[in-house]
Amino acid sequence: MEDKEFSGRCDSEIPAAFVLAAREGTTNLLGLLRLIAAGVALCLAPALYGQSQTDTQTNGTQSISPVPILSAGVAYNSFFNGGTHNVHPLVSPVVLIPFRQNWLVESRDTFEINLAPVPGMSGYKGALKKEVDYLQLDYIANRYLTATAGRFLTPFDVYNERLYPVWIRDLQTDPLILPISTGPSGAGTGAMVRGGFDATPGIEINYATYFSTLSTDTPFDSQRMAGMRAGIFLPGPRVEFGGSFQHLLQDDRTNAFGFHGAWQPPSLPLDVRAEYANSHEGSGYWVESAYRLSQVPVQHDVLRHVQVVGRMQRYFTGTVPDDRLPSVNTSLFEFGLNYYFRDDLRLVSSYGRQFAPQGGNMNIWNIGMTYRFVLPVGHGST
């Protein structure tokens, strides 16, 4: 079972990318990706390799020279929403560029198209949507604190930061409450401080505080807001729970709060997650569980690749309407079945039933594929 989520000191995609790169290497990547990587390496080599020669010894201990990482997630999903067929291809490249021992530039962009049939016309039509998910400069001061400046994912609850990418999420549909208090595009523009520490040998605390300024420039739009999130992680039972608070510094200057929880029992390939959010835009919750059938004693070679997912959620309208949220109170139950050909390649499928007044009842089907590669550019030294 992948440990996608739990980390007492860091809850972004940075450590996952470095670990995956070290494990997977580059032997199974396509030639085109090698050409892209070679071009990036030629641009970065003078600065990076110059640093690896100077940062070799610190207090008698040999240091590790980091290298850039190029990664990307690709998805192709086919949705049926109440009888309407939509095709949704997506590409999301991630770039990590470390320099010296404490600095990191990281970026993730998303390019996606929602293709839908047009009444009276043949074929499917849609427009390319481009989004800068984050583009930030990190200073890793020590194991307890990282300072960030730029465009960052809003750390309100945890789905937006940890589970949103298509190659990580177990169900390809977004939770209904996801837009609550994450900003117009799930990101803020400003500064953030985050980190974690051991409260006791069996309790770890993680935190994030942030300030975002108002920006109306697409694709860097964001709200003027300030907030924080704190969580407690128990490594023994692998349980995490925490809360979020945010104050909007524009318009009606309202407050929002949320709670999150997760459990990955050490003895079972099971993920249980839940979130609650409340703001003037609305409120609601979702609860999700995902179980990998690797412990089933029959047909083990086949079933160990299969994952069963279930999610129940409810949304309640608020005082201020938001186009990204349902216009009426809505309940949604979803069941998913995923097949992992490899850790980086899987077939995804799901069925959901939405219940809403005023004709909002409908079935939601999805079938698709997701893939992710991780490519280190160059070779680090110790």
Image: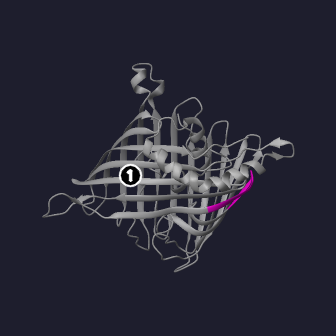
Magenta part, dominant SS: strand
Residue bearing mark 1: 173
- Could you say where residue 327 lies in the image, as x and y percent from the top left? 35, 67
Residue type of the residue flagged with mark 1: Thr
Viewer-side residue, 34 vs 374: 34
Viewer-side residue, 326 vs 172: 172
Q: Is residue 82 visible?
A: no
Q: Is residue 221 visible?
A: yes
Q: Residue at x 56, y 63 (%)?
A: 135
Residue 186, compared with residue 88, is above or below; it is below
Q: Is residue 143 magenta?
A: yes
Find the magenta span and give its range: 137-147
Q: Quadrant of residue 177?
A: bottom left
Q: Categorize mark 1 by other alpha carbons within 10 Å: few (<14), some (14-19), many (20+).
A: some
Check the image and name the residue furthest to the left.
120
Q: Relative to 324, is 96 on the left or the right?
A: right
- Could you say where residue 234 lies in the image, as x and y percent from the top left? 67, 42
Residue 124, compared with residue 321, is above or below; it is above
Q: Secondary structure at mark 1?
A: loop
Q: Relative to 347, is 233 on the left or the right?
A: right
- Could you say where residue 86 lies in the image, as x and y percent from the top left? 27, 55
